[in-house]
Image (cartoon, rainbow, N blue to C red):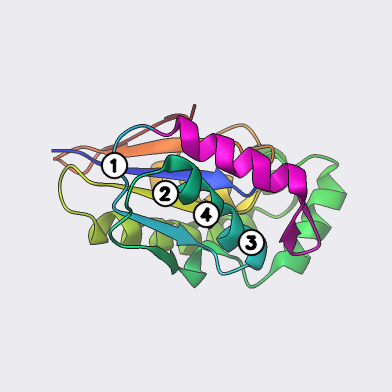
């Protein structure tokens, strides 16, 4: 059986708090989510935790595992990410790797380990929601699967499915 993680960027914010539009967007995303969710994860940033909570509320179903902080979904080097984005003039993984391949590679590997932990905590057939940031979400996907996904705007996400043999597939979340 498959395990699924829906990895999303938090919705619009001002500082570390969602705006009214961000709350509304997160509720709408949750309303569109299909199937049961076992647990929701946040990077630990208030905006990500608030977005995860609003998505769960919008989903309208019990989430047995609640909303849990997984600090590995957040880089400890956000300042360096900002520098690299400034140098690249874009925030896609290929452009960022062209500026500092070693840094992006190391960060992608660490962020991928956090994603792998989420999969390891799920039983077959279960689904988790994870809310974090960009471009680190994209780096986590790259580190886990080797696949480059386009930059995620606020509220956007990808669905990552791990099949019974451990292989991953990635698609845009609805």
* Residue indicated by mark 1: 36
**Left or right placement of residue 147 versus residue 46 in this view:** left
Q: What distance separates the C-alpha of mark 3 from that of mark 1?
A: 36 Å
Q: What distance separates the C-alpha of mark 3 from that of mark 2?
A: 27 Å
Relative to 42, is 140 above or below? above
Percent position of residue 116, x then y: 34, 57
* Residue indicated by mark 2: 129
Percent position of residue 95, x then y: 72, 40
Circles 3, 1 touching at the beta carbon (< 8 Å): no
Q: Residue furthest front?
A: 60
Circles 2, 4 touching at the beta carbon (< 8 Å): yes
Circle number at residue 173: none
Q: Mostly what secondary structure, the magenta segment?
A: helix
> Along the line of sight, which residue is nearer the eye, 173 or 98?
173
The local secondary structure at tag 2 comes to strand
| Mark 3 crowdedness (10 Å alpha carbons): few <14, some 14-19, many ≥20 | some
Percent position of residue 72, x then y: 49, 68
Q: What distance separates the C-alpha of mark 1 from that of mark 4?
A: 15 Å
Q: What distance separates the C-alpha of mark 2 from that of mark 4?
A: 8 Å
Front disc: 4 or 3 = 4
Residue in view at x 23 percent, y 46 percent: 126
Circle number at residue 52: 4
> Along the line of sight, which residue is nearer the eye, 30 or 68?
30
Q: Is residue 30 magenta?
A: yes
> Along the line of sight, which residue is nearer the eye, 24 or 145?
24
Q: Is residue 137 magenta?
A: no
The local secondary structure at tag 1 comes to loop
**Left or right placement of residue 66 versus residue 9 in this view:** left
| Mark 2 crowdedness (10 Å alpha carbons): few <14, some 14-19, many ≥20 | many
Image quarter in which the N terminus is found? top left
């Amino acid at each position: 059986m498959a395990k699924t993680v829906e990895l999303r960027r938090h919705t619009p914010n001002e500082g570390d708090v969602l705006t009214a539009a961000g709350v509304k967007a997160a509720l709408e995303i949750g309303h569109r989510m299909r199937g049961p969710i076992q647990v929701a994860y946040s990077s630990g940033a208030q905006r990500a935790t608030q977005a995860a909570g609003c998505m769960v509320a919008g989903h309208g179903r019990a989430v047995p595992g609640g909303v849990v902080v997984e600090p590995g979904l957040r880089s400890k080097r956000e300042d360096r990410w900002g520098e690299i984005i400034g140098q690249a003039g874009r925030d896609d993984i290929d452009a960022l790797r062209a500026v500092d391949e070693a840094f992006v590679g190391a960060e992608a590997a660490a962020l991928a380990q956090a994603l792998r932990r989420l999969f390891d905590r799920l039983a077959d057939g279960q689904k988790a929601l994870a809310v974090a940031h960009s471009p680190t979400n994209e780096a986590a996907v790259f580190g886990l699967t080797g696949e480059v996904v386009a930059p995620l705007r606020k509220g956007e996400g990808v669905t990552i499915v791990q099949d019974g043999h451990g292989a991953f597939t990635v698609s845009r979340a609805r």
